[in-house]
Image (spheres, rainbow, N blue to C red):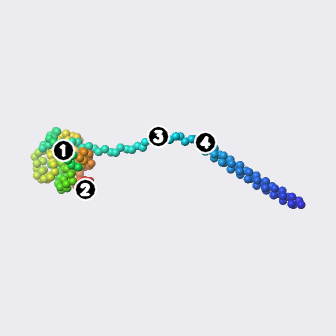
Amino acid sequence: MIRKKNMKREKTHHFLFALFGLLISLFIFNHVLAADDKKKDDKPAATPAGPPVPIYIPPLPRHVEFPPITYGKEASIEGETELNITKMRFWYVAILASWNVKSNEIADILNKNYKVFTQRNVGVIALYSNDTKESVANWRKKNNPLFMNEFASRNFLDALKNPKIPTVWVIGNLGEVLQRLELPTKEEMQKSVEKVMILTAF
């Protein structure tokens, strides 16, 4: 009899212990939920969206503009003529000298490609700097240039800041400088010609 009573008491104790554990678990769970809700409520209200911040777009690089090409039959300050560059799509402009060996090499490359240049609307003009009429006359007999070749005006050379001899430019018909070759080698000149050929292939 006593044994049965003890068993009942143990069952009651187990039940009460389990019930107490369940109540503790529910209390903790509710406490966690309440804390989470408080965090959500404590979040600052979203500020209204302002105007979008403009994106900085760097400006496109500008082409350097070539000065007016003035020249004449002999050395002068202003020159007799100004070249109309709008007649061609592109131009080779070279500053050469009769006493300069590299000038001979450049003239040879320009001569060899002159026919194709003409077909593709590429003009060529060579202008002498620091030269005399007599030495230029001899140079012409020796190199037989097919392209325009005259004396650069002093104003033109000053605008170019007295370039080294030889210096070659490729320019567009609006005066934009596309390429500048200072003291170019044969290989550099040939690469330039190849690029111009690609540019004018259409």
Label 1: which residue? Answer: 83
Q: Give above or below for 155 relative to 100.
A: above
The residue tagged with tag 3: helix, strand or loop? loop
- The quarter of the rendered structure image containing the N terminus is bottom right
Please name the amino acid that badge 3 sits on: Pro
Q: Amino acid at mark 2?
A: Ala
Measure the C-alpha gap from mark 4 to mark 3.
Answer: 27 Å
- Kind of residue at badge 4: Asp
Q: Residue at x 19, y 44 (%)?
A: 84
Q: Position of residue 194 (x, y in %)?
A: 25, 56
Q: CA distance from mark 2 to mark 4?
A: 69 Å
Q: Does any portion of residue 130 appear in the rendered image?
A: no
Instruction: Give residue 51's mark.
Output: 3
Q: Are marks 2 and 4 in contact (CB under 8 Å)?
A: no
Question: Which residue is identified by label 2?
Answer: 201
In the foreground, 55 or 132: 55
Q: List the residue tagged with mark 4.
A: 42
**Foreground label between 4 and 3:** 3
Say which label, 4 or 1, has the lower sequence index. Answer: 4
Would residue 18 be visible to someone looking at this image? yes
Which of the pair 84/131 is nearer the observer? Answer: 84
Q: Say whether marks 1 and 2 touch (CB < 8 Å).
A: no
Judge from the rendering whether residue 167 lies leftward or rightward of residue 8; answer left or right: left
Q: Residue at x 22, y 44 (%)?
A: 163
Separation of residues labelled 1 and 2 (CA atoms): 25 Å
Residue 24 vs residue 75: left or right? right
Mark 2 and mark 3: span between their CA atoms? 48 Å
